[in-house]
Image (spheres, rainbow, N blue to C red):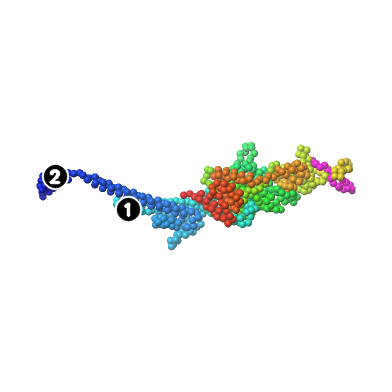
Amino acid sequence: MRKFDLMTHFNRICHESRCSQHLRRFVASTDGTMTILALFLIMMVFTIAGFAVDVMRYDRERVRLQYALDRAVLAAADLDQELCPRVVIDDYIRKEGFDPAIITKIVVDPETCETNEDGTIKQVEQLEGKRKVEASADMSIETHFMKWSGVDHIDTTATSIAEESIGNVEISLVLDVSGSMAGTKLTNLKEAANDFILEMIAKSEDDNISISIIPYSEQVAVPDYLMNKINTTGGNEVANCIDFQTADFSTTAFTAYSIGAESEETSPPPSVRQTLHFTENGNTDHRSSGTVVDKFNPWDPNFPCREELDKDRREMVVIENDTTVLTKLIDNMVAAGSTSINVGLKWGLALLDESTQPLINSVANDTNVPKVFKDRPRATQTTETMKVVVLMTDGKNDLQREVLPPYNDGLSDIYWNDGANKYSVLVDENNGLYKWPDIPVNEWKVVGGSWKYWQREANQDHAYGDGSTRYRRCKYWYSSGRCYNYYSEVRDEPEPGSAERLTWPDVWAYTERQAIESLLRRTKGNTYANNFRDNSVLTSNTTTKDANVVSLCTQADKKDIIIFSIAFEAPNSVKQILKDCAIKPARYYEATSGQIGRVFDSIGTSIQNLRLTQ
């Protein structure tokens, strides 16, 4: 077959014509080749942009899925969540516009729900202390542009884990039980505090949470087992309270014990003043009846510490997680006395400060403090332990009384003869002279069948009951009865009973203050008695005690101890102190009697949120 040649054909038709010239120019021209390249590049850019759109859509949906799953898992892990975790997660995923079928895995620890035969899910066990929820979802995202290259879908997987638990928490409930709390306020406080205790312990893992309860009025009653370990001055068996001094309020620590002290230590161990059982007012002596001063009016505000009556009703519960023990004290609390916010807060902080750990360890025997808490209070800033004080008051700091040295400790100059019910007082220690205020110096007495007038020395060389009394017969005497001349006749009278030198704590426990003053005035004279009257008892005022509270709150903040404060129908004068003490406004509450329950609920929720891990 003959080959067809276009150029030859045209040359034949248009030989040497203008037509052939134009055609040859057209065939040889290279103009327009860039147009083809431009069209190709435009297609490439369009394709890449389409791929980018698909990637952005994928990333948007992936983030939306992850966000929805995170929210769902957090809600499902909430200890307050009443629905089963699977139900919560499905609901969240559906409301975000996803098909719940994309959920591939849900793991719940502990599992408290089960699926019924009809497919519904219900809770079958009580949740306690901790919940961990893990969920995964797989989703396929359709592409719009990548499908040109054969990629119809992009797969993504989202996984989320959430855990909510109340970890290691040490709580001090510092509760006002002063006289103004009586009635409805105390009733509502008891209900709120009990609910708080039950809720906190129910939502904690075993032995992760410990709670101390510090009821306070003018003083705080310390359990015998703890008081017996504390180094005190003014020790007595009636009043189990501590008179903290100004320096004690500059720290959260408490070190007045000798547990673990080195044997070669030569300096005296730290000590605190034990409150004396006394009344500031009154002129009655109860020693002959053997009855301590407050038995006649046990809730008289003059008595700052009432150990016998405080037991089981106002005595501290120390580092405990037994709800029976904790709620029993709350239920038994009674309101009486004045208000010492500073003393209550000091004890609340001391039971959170690691300085008391050796002391707590020494009493952690399951009878007093659970053995599992022997290492508490834990170090504040070196362990994963949250320390919380809940400080509640309905009033301002008011008067607080304490007996001052030298009248609060050691031996007094007062002796008591229990067999004769008589006092003796040492009036001249250098010469060993005593006065017997209740034994007459002069007396009429029948001796040898006739009445005779006798006189003894006003100052004796022993306390009444530790010897015999020498009387001389008076010959002449003044109208006052004092002899100024004597017969030679003498007689020695035996003294019944025996004398015991009293400690100052014992003096105060059975004798009211004005009666002590009267006894000293009759024996040691006006100067000594006046000094006793003016310097034996200190009354702390509101200003001093408010400063103590401020100092303690500052120290607590330095030790990372969280304080929630509650002004429970409290006057304005105390609200600012409580607000400052809480540091953060969200941790300060004002409550009426009807609101106190919600306040404790809010504090419990705040503590849970602070311990939330994701």
Q: Circle 2 — which element? A: helix
Range of the magenta residues?
Answer: 442-465
Answer whether residue 150 is magenta in the image.
Answer: no
The residue at 64%/52% (across/down) is 178
Q: Which amino acid does label 2 sit on?
A: Gln
Q: Where is residue 388 in the image (x, y as percent from the top left)?
A: 55, 48
How many numbered marks have been drawn onto this rendered protein structure?
2
Instruction: Specify whether residue 462 is painted magenta.
Output: yes
Q: In this view, does 398 lie to the left or right of 529?
A: left
Report the disc number at residue 21.
2
x, y percent for residue 243: 65, 45
Alpha carbon of mark 2 to alpha carbon of mark 1: how far? 52 Å
Question: Could you say which is closer to the camera, residue 561 or residue 311?
Answer: 561
Q: Helix or strand or loop: what does disc 1 sit on?
A: loop
**Which numbered marker is on residue 229?**
none
- The crowding category of the residue bearing disc 1, from other C-alpha atoms within 10 Å (few below 14, some 14 to 19, many at least 20), is some
Q: Residue at position x 68%, y 44% from top?
A: 538
Q: Which of 484 and 108 is in front in this view?
A: 484
Q: How crowded is mark 2: few (under 14 residues within 10 Å), some or many (20 or more)?
A: few
Up/down of 123 relative to 506, above or below: below
Q: Earlier in the sequence, mark 2 or mark 1?
A: 2
Quadrant housing residue 529: top right
Depth check, front residue: 408 or 181: 181
Q: Which of marks 2 and 1 is in front?
A: 2
The reply to whether residue 366 is in sight is no
Q: Is residue 408 above or below residue 325?
A: above
Q: Where is residue 475 in the image (x, y as percent from the top left)?
A: 89, 43
**Label 1 sits on residue:** 144
Amino acid carrying label 1: it is His
Q: Position of residue 510 (x, y in %)?
A: 72, 49
